[in-house]
Structures are given as C-alpha cells and as structure tokens.
Amino acid sequence: MALRRFYQHFDQLCDLRLWKMQLLDENHLLLKYASEDVVLFRLSDPNSQPSFFVVYNIQTTRVLAVYENTSEELLELFEDFSDLLRNAALHSELTCSPSNNVHARLVQQRFKQTIVNARYGGQTEAVKRLLAQLPISSQSYSNSPYLDLSLFSYDDKWVSVLERPKACGDYPIRFYARDSGLLRFKIYAGVQGRNPPPAARRLVAFTFHPYDPFAISVQRTNAEYVVNFHLYKSES
C-alpha cells in the first residue's frame, strides 16, 4: 500500500525542494520539504501549503521517519520533547517550554483552540500552524528567568520566550509573581511621553539576557526605529 501511494504521488514528490533544516544532534537532521512555489515565497500563505518533515541519520544515510505538516503524531512529539528541538545545548535549567512547564503548555493549548474555533480554522489548520515553527532556530528562544511562566505571569500577546516582533501596546507590560500574584516589575517598550501616529502599526522585539535583569527592545513604528535598554530599577 505504501509503495502504491509512493508511485501515485511520484511526480509531486519529485517537485519537492529542501526548504529548511535543523541539526537535532551530532547524527540526525530534521529536514523540511515543500514545493518550489512555497520555498520561493510565491504564495501568500506558505505555511498553509502541504509540506513534509524528514528525520535523517547522517551516519547511516537512512531516512528514519517522514511526517506531513498535518501529522498529529509529530505535533505530539513536538509538544512533549520541545526542549530537545529548541536548545542545541542546555546551559541553563531556566527554559520554559510546553514540555516542562504547565503554564507554557496551557498557553499553547489556548493558542491551538483559538485556531480550531476560528473561521476557516479547525484541527488540521491548528496542527499546520503549530508545526510551521519547525525546524527551529535554537537561538530564537530565550532562557531568561524573567520569561519563565512558572515564576512570572504576563500577557504573552506582548512578549514571549520566542524572540520575534510582536504588537506594541500603549501600556507597559506587567509581570506578576506566580506565587503571590503581586506586581514585580513593568517594561515600557516605547518612548514614554510621546504619542505615536494614530494609524501607525507598531512592532517591538525583545532580547533578554540569559540570567541578568537586562533586556533590549527594538520598536518599529512605520519606518522609524527606537532601541531601548531595560535595566531593573528598585522601587525602594
């Protein structure tokens, strides 16, 4: 049956191109294949198009597994072993991921359910959106304890462990202690005392120090960039 399907879709398989790759360990690669139109970004929403993930052993030159981007099995592996995919080398125990943090798992489940319930959504679309994160650049996730959801509670709409641009709000981002619920600190992403243009689309990207209370934010408002350095300031 598998061989019959292989020959049935042989032309489509020949049209696949290597899109992305990730070194899982010293012997294994995670490869992502898609059509040429997807790889060259000729389509408006490339992540919604069919793609395939291949686990390849470099030493034995064997293909160990192949998954489609609608695979529930691959998503389950991603959620249960996300630390192995995110971190090439763990120098800190302060990682926060769905596989080791119940609060991070709840955030991911909430995001998945939002896609399932959305218009033109559904379970298959949710799997595609979540697996679109693979392969992962291991340097794109922060190990900062200030983003650890078991230590602090904050709105992941404005900042998260994934270092990518997010919408910039008009108010500071508030961080509450998980154990007491008390406000511990706030981060102002923009320029205080200055109102942005009414129709401006503002994005901000944060880079946190691995363990010190220090962060850098880069905010973009239209074609203007503002860089801020955030240091901890005691209220006392």
Image: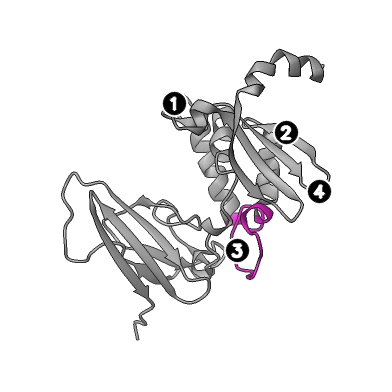
Query: Where does residue 160 sit, x and y in percent of width and height?
Result: 47, 56
Query: Where does residue 220 sit, x and y in percent of width and height?
Result: 28, 54
Cα separation, mark 1 vs mark 2, equals 30 Å
Along the viewing direction, whichever of 127 and 41 lies nearer the viewer: 41
Compared across the picture, whether 64 is left or right of 18 comes to right
Q: Residue at x 45, y 32 (%)?
A: 41
Residue identified by numbered label 4: 59
Compare marks 3 and 4 and give the one earlier in the sequence: 4
Q: Name which residue type carries label 4.
A: Gln
Residue identified by numbered label 2: 66
- Choose top left, top right, bottom left or bottom right for residue 89: bottom right
Q: Name which residue type carries label 3.
A: Thr
Q: Residue at x 66, y 56 (%)?
A: 83
Q: Which residues are magenta?
A: 83-103
Along the viewing direction, whichever of 206 and 113 lies nearer the viewer: 206
Query: Where does residue 190 sit, x and y in percent of width and height?
Result: 27, 62
What SS does tag 1 mark? loop
Residue 69: mark in rendering: none
What SS does tag 2 mark? strand
Compare marks 2 and 4 and give the one earlier in the sequence: 4
Q: Residue at x 70, y 37 (%)?
A: 54
Q: Residues within 10 Å of mark 2 (few under 14, many from 20)?
A: some
Residue identified by numbered label 3: 95
Which quadrant, please, contains the N terminus? top right
Q: Name which residue type carries label 2.
A: Val
Between marks 4 and 1 in the image, the one whose residue lies nearer the viewer: 4
Between marks 1 and 3 in the image, the one whose residue lies nearer the viewer: 3
Q: Is residue 74 magenta?
A: no
Between marks 3 and 4 in the image, the one whose residue lies nearer the viewer: 4
